[in-house]
Amino acid sequence: MSDSAPIGCDLCVIGSGMAGMCAALFAANQGLATVLVGRTGEIIFATGLLDLLGVHPPGAGTLWNDPWAGIDALVRDFPQHPYGKVSKNAIRAAFEELTGLFQSQGLPYTGFPERNAAVLTAVGTVKLTYRVPLTMWSGVAVRQRRGACLIVDIQGLKGFSARQIKANAAGGWSGLRTVKIVFPGANPEAEVFPERLARALETESVRASLAEVLKPHIQDAEAVGVPAILGVSKPTEVMQQLEKRLGCALFEIPTMPPGVTGMRMKEAFERGLAARQVGLLLEHKAFRAVVDPQSGFGIDVGRMEPERSIRAAAVVLATGRFMGGGLEADRHTVREPLFGLPVTQPEQREHWHREDFLDRRGHPVNRAGLEIDERFRPLGPAGQPAHPRLFAAGSILAHQDWIRTKCGSGLAMATAYAAAAAAASELKKG
Amino acid sequence: MNQASPAGRSPPCTSIQRSQRDILETQVLIIGGGITGVGLARDLALRGVHSVLVEKRDIAAGASGANHGLLHSGARYVRSDPSAAVECREESALLKRLAGHCIEDTGGLFVAVEGDDEAYVADFPSLCARCGIACKPLSAPEARELEPVLSERLIAAFQVADASVDPFHLCLDNLCEALELGSGVRLHTRVVGFEQDHGRIRGVRLINDETGEESTIAADLVVNAAGAWAREIAALAGVEMDLLYSKGSLLITDQRLTRRVINRLRPASDADILVPGGTVSILGTTAIRIDRLDQIVPTVAESDHIVDTAAAMVPSLSTTRYIRAYAGVRPLIGSRSLENGRALSRGFALLDHAVDGVENFISIVGGKLTTYRLMAEKTADLLCRRLGVERPCLTSVRALKSFPANRWTAAGLSPRLWMQANATGDLLLCECEMVPASVVDAVIQSIHDQGGPPSLYAIGRRSRVGKGTCQGAFCGLRINAYLYDQGRLEGRQGLTDLRSFLGARWRGMRPILWGTAMLQEELQEAVHCGYLGLELGGRL
């Protein structure tokens, strides 16, 4: 490890997924000197949709148009669910602060007051979500009224078939049409990639050419759906300028991850957090954490190996699950590798997963994770907080299955908000 | 597809485009599309005997597609079953000459480690010699030089002539040659009953599980080659069969660990064979007596047992990444009083059910992949005698024909050809195994020729699709999108198909979910359920 001086801060957030990014944002908004450490993060896999709660209980597959009522039911049935430890006002505040950051970075969100929106997916199924990027909103509206709609796919873009979307979404929606186009300037014989198309569309002339290609196909369409390729950094502008040329509404459908939607979020976070003076150590992994009950935490971080240390008075652990590295599994057990915290989990590997992948009840290991107290402090072996100023947020927490209940973003935001608030209040105590 | 594609110039599996559904009578009706059934179809076709093969699922869907892919030198059976050892020696040598395109002649090693039975080790060379099986002793350092992953605790090693065979390729080429010679096939077609009259089967009643279509085929002779399902078929004809089921589970590593087949030198036991197969290695197996055929699923306990046991031979097996487990079932003819499945003969039984009162009904049960040709020959000899056909068997002298559309089951082939063709316009639909759209097209054409539906499952059996690290999570979505785009899928059929494909892949993933595989699973579930909501059945 190089001998560069340690970085000092009030709070070190470990993990650069949705929960880590949110925790850093909320902590910075609370005035804490914050450093964020994390590898690429799962955020590049994000669809861009901000879920709050879509399904509960997963076994029954009950869908909730009102996610707040859904949360009531969820917390009633699973009192240990992390949502049970956050007030609705805190969740609302978290949404406000996060969408505020996105708005300021050119990524505005919208949605229905108090209820979920139904968004068309890349295979033509429909997903319930709470807040939707403005670039996807016309799709919600046109689907809701079953208006005349054209879905466009692009020659050479894999995993996105307009005909598939229509085949699965068309029940009762007769005004749905499809067309395949060659992207302006692209070789029709070659593969095309969402990011390159998105960057190309940030140029006026490419937008003009695309509009010319699309125009003859629009006919009676009130809205045109395209894969999510409408620019990376200024998608709303790209959309609005194309809409002006086309004379009808335009909307995006998230592509298979990783796609442009995740990149937009990641870039917006990075710009927004930098503007709030958050120290960003991205592409860095936390290799080792030393805990001192008196002075706080020493965390060794680096790209491939430990390069420097962070000294922090408090830590929010938001390292996620297996993809994020927050949990690790060998053949016998699931561990939390950084602090060695106890992980609540099924007793044997035999019981980690159900026999059917799509079993609606979800896999028991997906509810494995850290136990926390009311202030989001992970519990040590004795059932007491492992450290007074160690907090945890996001999917590393036990007793939730964000994938099956469709609450990933909401869970990340809500728990990050609560953890950051608890950290701020602990630190103020001195 | 365009010309510059690996599969661009491949002719379809068979040029004979006869409508399989129109054939309503035949000389021999073969039940079962495993290696026994397709081998028999080819043998009969070469003798000018017409057959129709019916298979309730797909080619090699049972034990034929769920084994090590090991072409035995015979050394494994020198003590337990010397006559089987000799058969293996002869047949493997013959197949290397006549079906070499389905075989990788890797060679093999038998190795013992500290604690293994030294008397068994000492007897091994003379037992091999007695069966005429070449076996060259190696010192432990020599063996470790050939295969560096072998344990440092090696006490003995012998080199033998084992090889690796691609059972899917072998099955498909046997089938295609039979079809080209005029035989018939019906996939996804189940036998539901026999029309019997005075001790003869007059007609075999069938139902196509894809279309629901019912039909009856009249046959002079009916052969039950249904493998583990032979007892159920026999029962439909009112014949009782004493058949036991021994489940064997295997694991696939994400990399090829050895150049050669590695056998543990000890009496046949669990997890003692590691077979290279293209870019991966296959480790197994177990032997667990089951009583129902819906229990052919690899379990968590079995995968742990296999890893723990085999690590004595190759220590890195306890840390390597596995991408999949699978299980097959050995049908064993024998007395119910025998406890251990392995002690039963691996030899085959040719049962003429005339003694059971059905004169034109024959069952061929048991056997090994290595000796499939011999089994087919013996069965065809009997059938020809009964039909009064006097033509010699040709499969021992005539090379198995290689059909271009069937070669895509080989790992590493499509990436090589794709790169050679520099076919940038030929989109790679499966990125793990680099299977381009042109190969998917060729495979779909061959499925069409065989009268099956172009499902992800059928495509996966005939190519590397779904066999890489994503285990179908992403290629399944890409290929589905492609099939819709090409107009081959309509309505919600594609999503139903995708769910069942993912379900089948899951049975192989579940037992090996630890370590890195957990990351892959999490990503897959986030996409399939978190985003697409596939578990919800597409409601709203």
Image (cartoon, rainbow, N blue to C red):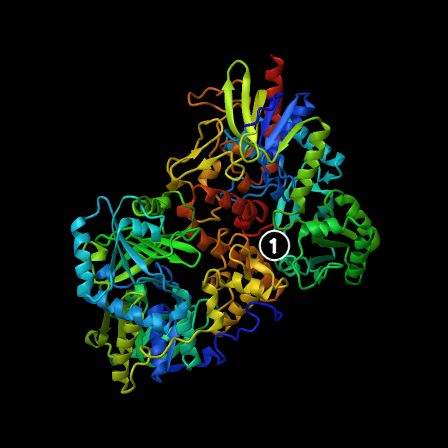
Please identify the quarter of the rendering in which residue B229 is found: bottom left
For mark 1, name the chain.
A
Amino acid at circle 1: Val
Q: Which corner quadrant holds the N terminus of chain A?
A: top right
The reply to whether residue A311 is visible in this rendering is yes
When the figure is inspected, residue A47 is found, relative to residue A74, above or below; the finding is below
Name, please, the residue furthest toward the top. A430
Q: Is residue B315 left or right of residue A344?
A: left
Closer-to-camera residue (B351/A22): A22
Disc 1 secondary structure class: loop
> Where is residue A173 shown, x and y percent of the image?
68, 57
Reply above or below: B178 against A331. Answer: below
Percent position of residue B142, x then y: 30, 52
In the displayed structure, does residue B171 sit left or right of residue B388?
A: right
Residue highlighted by disc 1: A123
Comparing A293 with A104, the one in front is: A293
From the viewer's side, name the closer residue of B477 and B261.
Answer: B261
- Residue drawn at (60%, 44%) of the image: A45
Q: At which x and y percent is residue B466?
A: 49, 56
Q: Residues within 10 Å of mark 1 (few under 14, many from 20)?
A: many
> How many numbered badges does the structure rendering display?
1
Q: Judge from the rendering whether residue A21 lies leftward or rightward of residue A205; answer left or right.
A: left
The image shows residue A51, relative to residue A75, as above or below, that is below
Q: Quadrant of the C terminus of chain A?
A: top right
Residue B391: % across, % down: 30, 86
Residue B88 occupies which quadrant of the picture?
A: bottom left
Q: Is the residue A425 above or below the residue A163 in the image?
A: above
